[in-house]
Image (cartoon, rainbow, N blue to C red):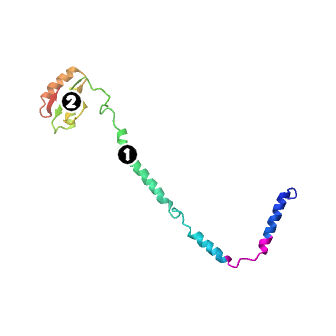
Amino acid sequence: MAKDTSLAAEVDLMRSVRAELSSAPGHENADAVWDRLSAEIDAEPQAANDNRRPWRQTLKYAAVAVLAVAAWQVTVGPRINQVPGEFRTASEQPAAFAFQVKFVESATLGEITALLAPLGGTITDGPSALGLMRISFAEAGLREEALDVLNNSGELVEFVAE
């Protein structure tokens, strides 16, 4: 303060204000003023989340996470884990030697594949809305041989369309 006159002047001003306030008479209703001010502060509305417990919000987030994982497992998971080679894609061209077959309604997939396996045929499309399945072969000779066998298999085959 000895080096800075403006600081010394400021300190003298504060000391004089303090002396004036201490010598002034006290307010006669000082407690009533404080009670009124305290009541107004208490009347202010509190924030909506002041009394909420944080674990409820955490449980909500955990439930959403569990539902998301369950939905993933049901919808996306089975599509990812498909065994390749069971069905052809839409862009894949079927074999050149093929025909369509309508099997009887009681024929199971196991019976159909047991009939086609020795003939060298594979199901490349179907069943369609009419129940037709496209059967493909690697060679023309296998196709002709399978045509004869399937035309004579009345217990599983309704008809063969070339």
Vertical placement of residue 30 versus 156, above or below: below
Residue at 17%, 23% in the rendered image: 145
Spot occupied by residue 11 in the image (x, y as percentages of width and height):
82, 63
Q: Which residue is farthest right?
A: 2
In the image, residue 78 lies in the stretch drawn in magenta: no
Spot occupied by residue 33 in the image (x, y as percentages of width and height):
65, 75
Vertical placement of residue 113 versus 39, above or below: above
- Label 2 belongs to which residue? 116
Tag 2: residue type? Leu
Distance (Cα) linking label 1 and label 2 = 35 Å
Tag 1: residue type? Gln
Instruction: Indicate the quadrant where residue 91 lies.
Output: top left
Residue at 41%, 48% in the rendered image: 68
Is 114 situated left or right of 10 in this image? left
Which label number is shown at residue 73? 1
In the image, residue 25 lies in the stretch drawn in magenta: yes
Q: Which residue is farthest bottom?
A: 28
Q: Residues within 10 Å of mark 1 (few under 14, many from 20)?
A: few
Number of on-image labels: 2
Which label number is shown at residue 158? none
Is 121 situated left or right of 51 in this image? left
Is 152 situated left or right of 142 in this image? left
Identify the element where label 2 is drawn. Answer: helix
Q: Which residues are magenta?
A: 19-30
Residue at 78%, 69% in the rendered image: 18
Task: Assess whether mark 2 and mark 1 are in contact (beta carbons under 8 angstroms).
Answer: no
Q: Residues within 10 Å of mark 2 (few under 14, many from 20)?
A: some
Instruction: Indicate the quadrant where residue 134 lies.
Output: top left
Which of the image's four quarters has the N terminus?
bottom right
